[in-house]
């Protein structure tokens, strides 16, 4: 069967693994080899210059890493894919390879903290012009794009405020001025959303998160138009932010259960979001699956599921957050997301730890916000855990009064 004809669950398992492996192995071997030898110098040179397929040095390409790249390429319906040592490696290598002094990028105020740091500090230091727009103001974003730009960088749903932007609309606006559209699809995953099919040119993921799914390997991936991926790859192979074989194997192994995990996390997150929305200790819940979410209709149109991450703000302040989080029993208080186990924390220690309180305020991130990444635990147990923690802080607050 042609893999392009298979469904996502099948491609999560078989993507990049349809060829027979050595010795009849049913899983991809881990090639922990720095270099790959050739007896024929002409063949070696052909591979080294890209005229023939093959591998010469693992900083450039590696057979195990290639399996992972093929999985994400197929799942995102891309022409080509490449990988990086971390998700930030994917973001920074993409931006620095496609931008330079005098170039202009238009993006959103709500992006992952590491990306925000690039936009606020690093890119301007290299003479790159950056304009950050109000995330859900599509008219403002389109107006800034129309002024002329070289790259439009989007994230949807955003980290950690779960705002949603219209990828088809903004991609069309960008292409009118010849700009490249890059989308961070980490929160949605290729199971819930495929930005390339909505007009984007490149899609990137922190593979550390949902793709891996087990909080035990780090990596980043980029896929999209072949000519653009090749340009980023050429920068990355010299810059050296290469993904190694062991984490590539672990991420690819995690991806085999991607659809199963995402389906469970989608359903659980929506149920938990509705529970929190109705709780009198919660100020607001940010989850695009809720009908009250400002981006719900856009999310319905471009997503097949709403994801496993939500944020919610407690009534109170950061002291309330500090009192609440340690009372949770079925949560790791840790700076990651997308795992089989539930993870939670405030932006000041997770997504936007790199930024100051003032910078977080500028980006519209309240200090009372909690990012909650739903795992695959039984959802009733997670709700009971939230209930007991919320009840405990309410009792403490009443005692003070």
Image (cartoon, rainbow, N blue to C red):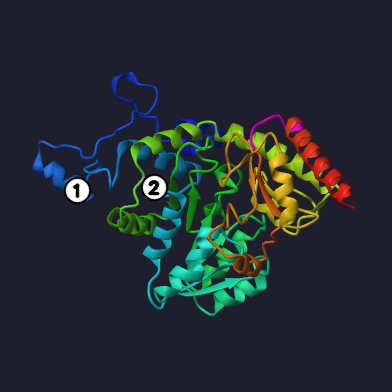
Q: What's the distance in space between the residues labelled 1 and 2, CA to CA?
A: 22 Å
Task: Tell me residue 273's x, y (percent).
Answer: 76, 45
Residue 132 is one of the magenta-drawn residues: no
Looking at this view, is 336 or 165 the one in front? 336
Q: Position of residue 125 (x, y in %)?
A: 42, 74
Verify whether residue 376 appears in magenta: yes
- Residue 90 lies, in percent from the top left, at 43, 54
Please state which of the two labelled residues, at mark 1 or mark 2, is closer to the viewer. Answer: 2
At a point 34% along the width and 41% down the height, the residue shown is 244
Q: Nearer the viewer, residue 363 or 255?
A: 363
Q: What residue sits right under mark 2 in the picture?
A: 85
Q: Which residue: 55% across, 35% down?
A: 258
Q: Mark yes or no: residue 319 visible.
A: yes
Q: Residue furthest top?
A: 24
In the structure shown, which secondary structural element does the residue marked by tag 2 occupy? loop
The image quadrant of residue 343 is top right
Q: Label 1 neighbourhood size at 10 Å, few (<14), some (14-19), many (20+)?
A: some
The mark that comes first in sequence, 1 or 2, is 1
Viewer-proximal residue among 78 and 192 = 192
Q: Residue furthest front?
A: 400
Residue 48's label in the rendered image is: 1
Relative to residue 196, is residue 278 drawn left or right?
Answer: right
Label 1 sits on a secondary structure element that is helix
The magenta region covers: 375-380
Q: In terms of secondary structure, what is the magenta stretch mainly?
A: loop
């Amino acid at each position: 069967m042609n893999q392009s004809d298979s469904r996502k669950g099948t491609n999560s398992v078989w993507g990049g693994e349809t060829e027979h492996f050595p010795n009849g192995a049913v899983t991809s071997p881990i090639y922990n080899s720095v270099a790959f030898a050739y007896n024929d110098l002409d063949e070696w040179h052909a591979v080294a210059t890209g005229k023939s397929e093959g591998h010469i040095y693992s900083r450039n390409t590696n057979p195990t890493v290639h399996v992972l790249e093929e999985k994400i390429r197929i799942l995102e319906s891309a022409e080509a894919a490449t990988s990086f040592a971390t998700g930030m490696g994917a973001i920074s290598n993409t931006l620095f390879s496609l931008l330079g002094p005098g170039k202009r990028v238009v993006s959103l105020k709500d992006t992952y903290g590491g990306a925000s740091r690039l936009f606020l500090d690093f890119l301007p230091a290299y003479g790159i012009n950056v304009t950050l727009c109000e995330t859900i103001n599509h008219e403002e974003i389109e107006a800034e794009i129309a002024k002329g730009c070289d790259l439009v960088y989007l994230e949807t749903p955003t980290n950690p405020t779960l705002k949603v932007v219209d990828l088809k609309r903004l991609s069309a606006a960008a292409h009118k001025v010849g700009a490249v559209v890059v989308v961070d699809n980490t929160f949605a995953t290729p199971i819930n959303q495929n930005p390339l099919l909505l007009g984007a040119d490149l899609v990137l993921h922190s593979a550390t998160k949902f793709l891996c799914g087990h909080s035990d390997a780090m990596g980043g991936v980029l896929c999209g138009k072949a000519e653009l991926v090749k340009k980023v790859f050429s920068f990355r192979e010299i810059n050296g932010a290469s993904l190694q074989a062991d984490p590539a194997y672990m991420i690819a192994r995690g991806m085999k259960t991607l659809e199963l995990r995402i389906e469970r996390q989608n359903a659980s997150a929506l149920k938990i979001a509705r529970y929190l929305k109705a709780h009198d200790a919660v100020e607001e819940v940010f989850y695009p699956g809720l009908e009250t979410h400002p981006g719900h209709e856009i999310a319905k149109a471009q997503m097949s599921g709403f994801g496993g991450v939500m944020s919610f703000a407690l009534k109170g302040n950061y002291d309330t957050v500090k009192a609440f989080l340690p009372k949770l029993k079925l949560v790791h208080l840790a700076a990651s997301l997308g795992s089989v186990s539930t993870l939670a924390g405030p932006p000041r220690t997770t997504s936007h730890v790199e930024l100051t309180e003032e910078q977080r305020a500028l980006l519209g991130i309240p200090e009372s916000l909690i990012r909650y990444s739903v795992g695959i635990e039984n959802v009733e147990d997670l709700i009971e855990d939230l209930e007991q923690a919320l009840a405990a802080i309410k009792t403490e607050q009443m005692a003070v009064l």
